[in-house]
Image (tube, rainbow, N blue to C red):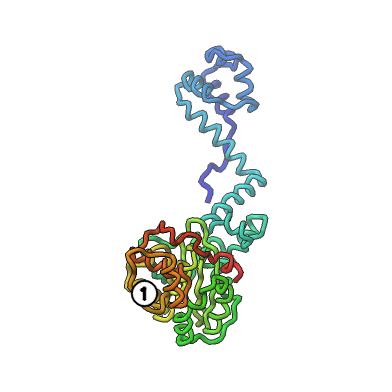
Amino acid sequence: MSTGPAEAFPVGEHLVEELDERGWTQAEFAEILGRPPQVISEIVSGRKEITRESAAQIAAALGTSPQFWLNLQDQYHLWRQAQDASSRRQLDDVRLRARLNELAPLTVLRKRGVITAATPQGQAEQLCRLLEIDSIDQEPRLPMAARRSNVAERVSPAQVAWLACVRRQAKQRRVPAYSVEALRALAERLSRLVRDPAAFASLPRLFADAGVRLVHVEAFPSSKIDGASFEMDGTPVIGLSGRGHRLDKVLFTLLHEIAHIVLNHIADGLILDEGDMDGQDQEQDANRHARDWALPGPLPTMPDRISQNWLTRVAHSLGVHPIVVVGRLQNDGVLNWRSLLAKDAPTVTAFLRSW
């Protein structure tokens, strides 16, 4: 709803009225101001705008304020702009672009090819389809009865957009009926299965066999998401951002999401895991299960000085990659996070992108 005037008049007309009331000619007024007569003539005719200096001089002569004359001038220009159809369309586009960026990180979505339209109107249509809303005036409705690892913060537009991308990819996956037994069995052997980082490329198929849709959407800047799990059309969905990059970190996030599903935590809605996945009872339960599944057996007695040879032998005996053992020791505080034993740790980003 517009709050501007129904009609506005050039500031020169207001100035002429003031001069007429006092019986001053434009030449006399110019002499009062100490300005050339041409300056007053150009202001009256609209060929010249009132500057801050001119506004101060006019105000001093007429007993008003400088802001009064500047406001009259701005009000008229804004009114003229509002009458121009081209200007109205430009302002409508500005409002639309602002709303689109309130809903989602549009620059990121365009960069990744999720939004491809060139016009704001086309972008609005594509964003509405992604967020599954009828118009941009609505708020996205994801399964947001969400429990989170960090309940103090609201779900941000970047996180909502990331989850919407996960949902869109998951809808393209067709899987058989979900089996909790099959998913639990997969979790128990997952660390051994991905001993070779390249094995991550085949995980969507293995999860599909258990009736779970596994998808990867690269983390959006500032979204802080590691993973999410929820139910869609009766089928569990796991979304991974791959934010940890390192094999053991991505593996643990995946096992953590599996635990949420196996423990039926997703029955009440989506679970969004970001950064420190600790604090709540459900997060702690999921962490315990993920920890047990990550290393399928106890660690032997540790020597005073942990060497690469010892790590290699232990990892071989457990059937896992050595970095999984390193990750456990780092989380337990036995090794610091800058340990040279984690140097050249394998990453799985390239294999996640193949999903």
User: Which quarter of the picture shows residue 63?
Assistant: top left
Q: Amino acid at mark 1?
A: Leu
Q: Please, is residue 108 above or below residue 182 in the view?
A: above
Q: Nearer the viewer, residue 23 or 7?
A: 7
Q: Which residue is mark 1?
A: 299
Q: Please, is residue 311 above or below residue 137 in the view?
A: below
Q: Nearer the viewer, residue 186 or 274?
A: 186
Other residues around mark 1 within 10 Å, as few (<14) / some (14–19) / many (≥20):
some
Position of residue 309 in the picture relative to residue 83 (left or right): left
> x, y percentage for residue 260?
41, 76
The quarter in which the C terminus is drawn is bottom right
> x, y percentage for residue 58?
51, 21
> x, y percentage for residue 209?
55, 84
Task: Give me the residue at 48% from left, 26% from top.
Answer: 66
Position of residue 89 in the picture relative to residue 312 (left or right): right
Position of residue 351 in the picture relative to residue 310 (left or right): right
Q: Nearer the viewer, residue 229 or 96?
A: 229
**Dot 1 lies on which element?**
loop
Task: Specify whether residue 144 is in view.
Answer: no
> x, y percentage for residue 84?
65, 43
Q: Nearer the viewer, residue 25 or 273?
A: 273
Task: Specify whether residue 310 is in view.
Answer: yes
